[in-house]
Image: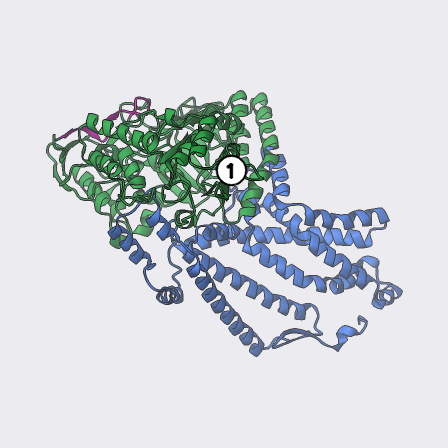
Chain colours: A green, B blue
Amino acid sequence: MPSSPLESIATRAFSRRRFLVGSVLGVAGTTLLAGCSPTGTTASGGKGGTLTYVDPEIPTSAQVQESGTWQTRDLIQNLTDRLVNRNPTTFELEPWIAESWTRSDDGRDYVFVIRDGVTYSDGSPLDVENVKRNLEWQVTGDTKNGVSANSQFPRAIAVDVDAATRQVHVHLDTPYAPFLNVLTSWSAGLVANATIAAPHDEQVKYTRLIGSGPFRVTSEDYAQKYVLERRADYAWAPASARNQGEARLERIVWVPTEDDAVRLGAVTSGQAGILRYVEPREETALARQGYTIVAKTGVGLSNQWFLRTTTPPLDDPDVRRALFHAIDRKQILTEIYTPNWHAATSVLAPHTFGYKDVSAAFAYDPDQAESLLTTAGWTGRDADGYRTRGGTRLHLKTYIDVYDNTANALFQNVQAQFKDVGIELELNRLDYASYWGKAFADPEVGFLRVGWPHPDPTVGLIEYYSKDGSDLLGLKGSDTTLQRLLDDQLLAVDDAERAALLEQTQDYLVTEKAYVLPILDDSQVFVARPGVSGLELSDGALPLFSGVSVSA
Amino acid sequence: MLSLGYMLRRALQSIAVMAIVYALTFLALFVLPGDPIENKISNPVNPLPQATADGLRAYYSTDQPAIVQFVLYLARLLHGDLGYSLTNGKSVAALVGQALAQTITLAALALAFTVLFALGIALVATFARSRLVRELARAVPVLSISAPSFLVGYVLIAVFSFRLGWVSSITDQGFVSLILPAVTLAFASSGSLAQVLIQGLSSARSQPFVTVLTAKGVAPSGIVVRHVLKNGAIPSMTLLALIVGDLLAGSVIVETVFNRTGLGYFTYTSVRDQDTPTIEAIVLLISAIYLSINLVTDLAYAAIDPRIALAAGGPRRGSARRRAEVPA
């Protein structure tokens, strides 16, 4: 979630919210004790009714290839369907709009059989021709219309269809092992031909996002209110969905509400039924008062810090390893977070394809950290207690992550823990707009935070650490072992082979080279009022509203 | 004392000022690093292939030199096209129109409350018989100036929305949703206005014409409403104009607390995101608002006090200003 360039405003907003939280939780207790019927929901015995949902962010573009933000993913997840689904409980792939598929042994050819009878909310059919158009659109984009290609997809495909057998044949010149996984992505949502043909400034509107999902947006009052209405004819949910038919809710009123305290107050006073993101310290109090906390870590990449080997003193592996052992995640989780948040155990999140627990490499061990720093020559101590070498203080610089509301507390906690072993951590702040531009370009920066849920771990790791991606480690391909591990994954169409390569990559990045320091697993937290039930989160920790019901 | 020549001069001056503001804003934004398109292209989480990146830059014209971009912006502006937001791709005209509609309604009500609060406080502080009441009334502006808007807003929300449930804290219910933010804005802006009014009224009530009117047998209420208030209000006109400008420019804090997306909020988010087309449109609009208000204020001076003549440099008082007023 973004912070602001008007830092004083943001800081005041953060501190002032404490004032209201007391009132809010007081109201929560009063309302529940009085048995008030929440106005945030209207119900009719478990089916039907309206849910008011409050989200901390204003949805950005509805154009699916541009849908990177949490709030946009959350919306699109409920408006569109995908060819393939990842079961949110078993995390295995399962059919969705593609009722079955086959892959050739060389990984170059895929045949998808498209489910019969699926339609978009404008009544047009989701047939093989439409699937072909979607796939080509994702791969090539529509540059003249300002639509970029989906970078998760392969760079080139050839698609043929057979309407009689409802088959879509996809041919890749080069094998692309992540292909099935990226088809589960929020940004791979299938849309009607009318959406693809619309000018870009129309595609950005949610009312023009014509999907085949359980809901459609019937009105959009930008930044104020988005009304989602269920599709009464929806009957093509994936097998793992608890609700196989039309959504239980008749309508969702989606209200962006940036102020944390007002969002919480809206739910506790009954003006809204579900919210996304509450400060960890409020989770426990709300749970005690009967609210349901729904939290999940999505598959993909964990919250991690990449260490720049080009920035001294991180060019020294011993210093990097010292950082690994200087962070006490247990203390951080106890002091800042709740049991819904977890320490990272790898650069990948648990349940992600190919995940391996490599947490032994960064177990909290301050003695080991001190010993490594001594070995690295940082043996002196200055008046402030920081280690020195040749009169130079052991100093690291970073910028506080602008995408995580808990980042301030997290970074400050780590700063204190680093000080305990004699490392000075300089924390800097940037606004949301210039974060990528300035923080990543600053040559003095030792590390920064990356890592969010992703439909495929290989694509995610390549985006970060390959010379063909963002090359965050600044290696420029000089580490041929890492580059080979990443490149080979793309071609490893055999699942066992790719899983083994992923495990090796995690070992290499964390245990062997100490390039990347996993911090926490990224959690999404939702709060539902008593009387609101059935909220589940997808494999990527996005809300699935189809099964939500409200009772009076 | 309005002359067509004066009005024309003022209009031309306003257009020149707006053009300078527009150009300076463009320049300032251009020299700042980063924009939403570059952020999208260089985003390490989602790096775009070079061909796609080039295509996007060309689509949004961010690959052109500054002067070319400026001419493109200007050409579009002259055709009434404000372009598209770099953040969400929506029409800037539609976004700004929506924000302006939100702000105008709120500002109008807040202005009415501001005048009402300030007048009430000033009248009580000046004319109340009890000294204690007068002193208490004089303390209210200090409280309103020093109380943070977010605090006032939170108190109002906690009581009237969360506790009593009279109004929604998150959705727009029409007029009723305007009341709490309008009261919050008015509470903040009425303090300084009340202080100036109190000074003006205190000064006006001690003028000799009050003695003359009293001797003529005019009722005290008539003296206050028809004469003292009219004379005492003139110094507060300038301040009121500034308040109107501030209200129309929007308030980030109040709009965020009350979940409104008016001009203040849009200014904040578009600056945060370096959304150049949106910022340019908002700057143009807000400068037009301030210039119009200045003009209206100058005209209002002349309307309230006919001794004030309008000249090229703005309102100018005649020699009568220095004479004691003797009403006819």
Q: Which residues are magenta?
A: A87-103
| Type of amino acid at the residue the image marks with label 1 | Gly
Percent x, y for residue B151? Answer: 63, 41
Horizontal placement of A148 versus A370: left or right? left
Among the 4 quarters of the image, the one containing residue B214: bottom right
Disc 1 designates what residue?
A380
Quadrant of residue A49 in the image?
A: top left
Residue A244 percent location from the top left of the image:
30, 24
**Closer to the camera, A486 or A206?**
A486
Task: Please state the chain letter of the residue tagged with numbered disc 1 in the rendered image.
Answer: A
User: Could you say which is closer to the camera, residue A71 or residue A374?
Assistant: A374
* Residue displayed at 53% across by 47% down: A7
Relative to B139, is A444 on the left or the right? left
Front-most of residues B184 and A331: A331
In the displayed structure, would residue B1 be above or below residue A291? below
Q: Residues within 10 Å of mark 1 (few under 14, many from 20)?
A: some
Dot 1 falls on a residue whose secondary structure is strand
**As drawn, which residue projects farthest toward the right?**
B215
* Residue A99 falls inside the magenta stretch: yes
